[in-house]
Image (cartoon, grey):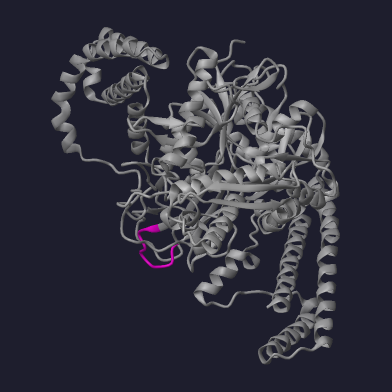
Amino acid sequence: MPGEATSACWSCGTMREVHFCSACGKVQPPVPVDYFTFFGFPRKLNIDTAQLEREFYDLSRKLHPDLYARAQTQEQQWSLEQSSQLNDAYRTLKDPIRRTQYLLRLEGIELEEQSKAATEKARTTGEVKKQVVPPDLLEEVFDLNMQLQELRMQKQVGEDDPALLEELGKHKLELEGKFEALLDELKSYWKQWDAAVDSGAEEDRRQILSKMLDLLNRRNYIRNLVRDVNEALES
Amino acid sequence: MASERIVGIDLGTTNSLVAHMQGDTPVIIPGEDGLNLVPSVVALDDKDQIIVGNAARKYLIETPERAVYSIKRLMGRGVDDVQDELRFFPFRLAEDLQPGEVLRIKLGHKTFTPPEISAFILRQLKRNAERYFGGSVSKAVITVPAYFNDAQRQATKDAGRIAGLEVLRLVNEPTAASLAYGLDKKQNGTVAVYDLGGGTFDISVLNLHDGIFEVISTNGDTHLGGDDIDNLLITIALDDIRGDMGLDLRRKGEVVQAIRKAVIEAKIALSTQPSTTLDVSLPDGRRYQREITREQFEELITPIIDRTVGPVKQALKDAGKKPEQIDEVVLVGGSTRIPRVRALVEELFQRKPHTDLNPDEVVALGAAVQANILGGGSDATENMLLLDVTPLSLGIEVAGGVTDKIILRNSTIPASATQHYTTQVDGQSNVAIHVLQGERELAKDCRSLARFDLKGIPSMPAGLPRVEVRFMIDANGILHVTAREQRSGKEAEISVQPSYGLTDEQVEGMILDSFDYAEEDFRQRQLIEARNEANTILTALGKGRDNPGWHQLTSNERKQIDKLEAALRTVMKGDDYQGIRKAIDALNQGTTRLAELMMDTAVTSVLKGKSMDTADVGEGPAAPHPVAKADFE
């Protein structure tokens, strides 16, 4: 298994597991490993979340600072580092979107352009954010922006057009439906990714990563649209 | 195992309690008066002795300028934060407060910070426990509202230290309550804890799973509780008296306190009776009498208790739970005795809440359970483990005054996260790190926790430096921040010193000052001073070992010093101050020759100059805030 340490326990000298000694149970100095390795999982996206939860509880029982309240300062520090790593890893892996984003980052792909930070950066520097509209949404986005503009104008002059509101509400529902459907699509890529990990085909892996990146960008894009509609309706 | 005594303390707005684990059961330790609750009231008597608890209550009415209650509302807060409180509470701030200084409250002609006043209460609880055990107590678990921010937590920890307690853990109050509840029940499921106390409201949703108490979400309001109900009723009574009797009593501290006592009694009576009468004798000999029905009371307090609805809904949403997915609702805090509050909870969760536990005591009992777990556990607590969360998101201010969140609320603690930033201006040598806590998008709307500058970044074009900011929240929910410029290795590390917090030196000073107010405890003071002195000599010795003079000693001399050092370190752990003094003297004598050798080499080392590996932290010219996440190759 990747990341399996081969060194000896600092306390009793037995060969140890990654996070704690299998013989005497003492916490070990933290090793910088990725979150999949931390749990001893392969770098695959279909994770048995029930097993993940079990591992999380088991490791918590061995690493949590409460168990080291009477230990030496050094062990307390290790326990703090280890259990924060455990919590961070669990939080990331249990959520399907965070898990996928994390894998992309591990594979060297940043989602920068769609991130909130990038939006804020663009806002403060005045640069136009490079935001690619997913091609199949072009027409819809165009329509929607027209409607949003109309709504804002109407609101300025204090008019109220029920037909427009209904139209926008329908749009919003459609977008939300698309947003939900993306999760199923993402899961189909997970399968492909996991198969590619097994077969080791580098070309396949790159392709799937890029598909997942597109999907996450789309997802963010749709989420932002829904947010815009909500803001326009509420303002 | 003969475990050391660790007590659990509920440091409440209205009442405080201390508890410990007796065999398999947590029990409250009563005070000398036989009562479990110690009112969180502190007064200064005419001999300038500190009086705490029930005995202090009469000062509230007789000499209100020498007494204080509900000090918890001021913990970790600045002058600007507390203007609202000052309208309703008779807190008298020191006149000479400087901007940015920790608040000081006047008691008679003396002034104390909120942590010092809390420390008086803790010291009383410590004494109660020591009398009960017939031995010293120096370690405690202290509970805090789950929704307390970093500054409020730090202030509570400081209070513990000032009171001479090593605070092994700060535990969130609703979580502590769930421990006491779970110890009884031992079953799996999802539990919501609704905690409406004297001054604070918390709601927490937990998963109970084979002894693991996993908090999934928490929310609340640190300024919402029974106090608000009391203040509303007091205002109404004062208005009545002014309108109907032509008497303006708003500035008469003693009368206001008498009215406060009467409305609290009325509030309590209305939990069991359909109506009651407020009855207060006024300074001019007349009486103010007014009947209040439960119906009127409920109508009056509805706007206050409805403020708990928002946090409850948010906590459920964050937990991803619908009300019907909650298996049990546990009520905590004295204000949950009010029938209207119970009805609201029932409505929100569509089930009858669990009311078997004494809502005043359950938090302290839970703190005792956690104390037992930290002390190594027992049969009753075997396999029990608490996994708590951070109630508020933490981040830093980036260019444009925007909050960049680094750790999101409801993350299980300990938690850590790292974020990268870069500079805005060519050749920028300083980056201002402004640490924030809160959910709002703009920095000015979040709580400012600390500011520091990362200095001395070598000149580089804008966008090239790579500033890594690392956040670590420990198991107490307290944040530690490090910042590093990775291309140059410049580093700044702070354990976040809250904007309205005490420095370590101030706390040390207060620990010593506090003994002036205690009757006994000279031994304690001696012990602390001896330990401080021991630390000084050990630090000096550590430096001595790096000195060339060390290597001019014979191996026998070095061995002798090692032996004396080990002896001092051992005796320091105990509380025999005379023993520590002896060991210090012995080490002092044993290192005389080393000191002489060091003097000889001192001149050369001055010429060597200093290497500055660490970036300065603290004051300095205003530096620009970093820019969010750089794109790196």
Seen in the picture, residue A201 relative to B368 is either above or below; the reply is below
Residue B271 placed where, x, y %?
Answer: 72, 43
- The part of the chain drawn in magenta is B423-431
Q: Tell me if residue B32 can be seen.
A: yes
Q: Tell me if residue B629 can be seen.
A: no
The answer to whether residue B143 is left or right of residue B326 is left
Q: Residue at x 55, y 17 (%)?
A: B5
Residue A207 placed where, x, y %?
Answer: 76, 60
Figure quadrant of residue B16? top right
Seen in the picture, residue B606 relative to B460 is either above or below; the reply is above
Residue B633 placed where, x, y %?
Answer: 54, 60
Q: Residue at x 32, y 30 (%)?
A: B47
Figure quadrant of residue B570? top left
| The residue positioned farthest toward the front in the image shown | B285
Magenta residues, dominant SS class: loop
The answer to whether residue B620 is left or right of residue B313 is left
Residue B227 placed where, x, y %?
Answer: 58, 48
Q: Residue at x 59, y 42 (%)?
A: B145
Seen in the picture, residue B18 relative to B321 is either above or below; the reply is above
Quadrant of the image containing the C terminus of chain A: bottom right
Camera-nearest residue between B322 and B452: B322
Figure quadrant of residue B541? top left
The answer to whether residue B165 is left or right of residue B278 is left
